[in-house]
Image (cartoon, rainbow, N blue to C red):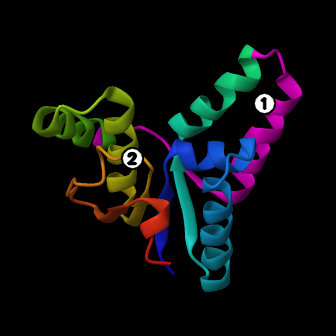
Amino acid sequence: MRRIFFDTNLFIYLFEGREPYRSRVVEIRRRMLERGDRLVTSAMTLGEILVKPMELGRSALAEEYARALRASAVIVCFDELAARRYARLRAAHGLRNADAIQLACAAQCGVDLFLTNDARLLKLDVPGIGFIAAPERAPL
């Protein structure tokens, strides 16, 4: 079993049906389930996926998104140890706050793979994360 972290953008593809990315993420998730891999994300992802439904005044949709996320993923909190990783990432790479939080949470829980479509993150080597890859290059 591997621990695979989905960045927020992958959940947005799933929930909003954005193609061609949605189909690839669905395939990745299917393969993860077959192999018994664990899906991981951060509490920040939860917050980020709720923004659009809340902007639109669609609280029922926001709750549906939250339930789906809780049912499918381990949600990692940003704690003191993650905060220290965050600071090292920001200092070393000049990352944006959101990117550094996501990577710090993933590294803190020790994931094998971090999936994102953020090209700026793909070149990073982050202790605690086995590999960072785009969905179309995911080794699954």
The residue under label 1 is which amino acid type?
Ala
Front one among 57 and 68: 57
The question of residue 5 being in magenta is answered with: no
Q: Relative to residue 43, is residue 76 depicted above or below?
A: below
Front one among 108 and 127: 127
Left or right side of 40 for 116: left
The question of residue 68 being in magenta is answered with: yes
**Residue at coordinates 38% horizontally, 62% vertically from top-left?**
133
User: Disc 1 marks which residue?
Assistant: 62
Residue farthest right in this picture = 60
| Image-quadrant location for residue 59 | top right
Residue 120 x/y as whole percent: 29, 43
Residue 139 x/y as whole percent: 43, 77
Q: How many marks?
A: 2
Residue 4 x/y as whole percent: 48, 65
What secondary structure is marked by label 2?
helix
Residue 56 x/y as whole percent: 78, 16
Q: Relative to residue 74, is residue 63 depicted above or below?
A: above
The residue under label 2 is which amino acid type?
Cys
User: Disc 2 marks which residue?
Assistant: 105
Give the magenta-colored segment's residue range.
56-81
Q: CA distance from mark 1 to mark 2?
A: 23 Å
Q: Quick one: label 1 or label 2, which is nearer the N terminus?
A: 1
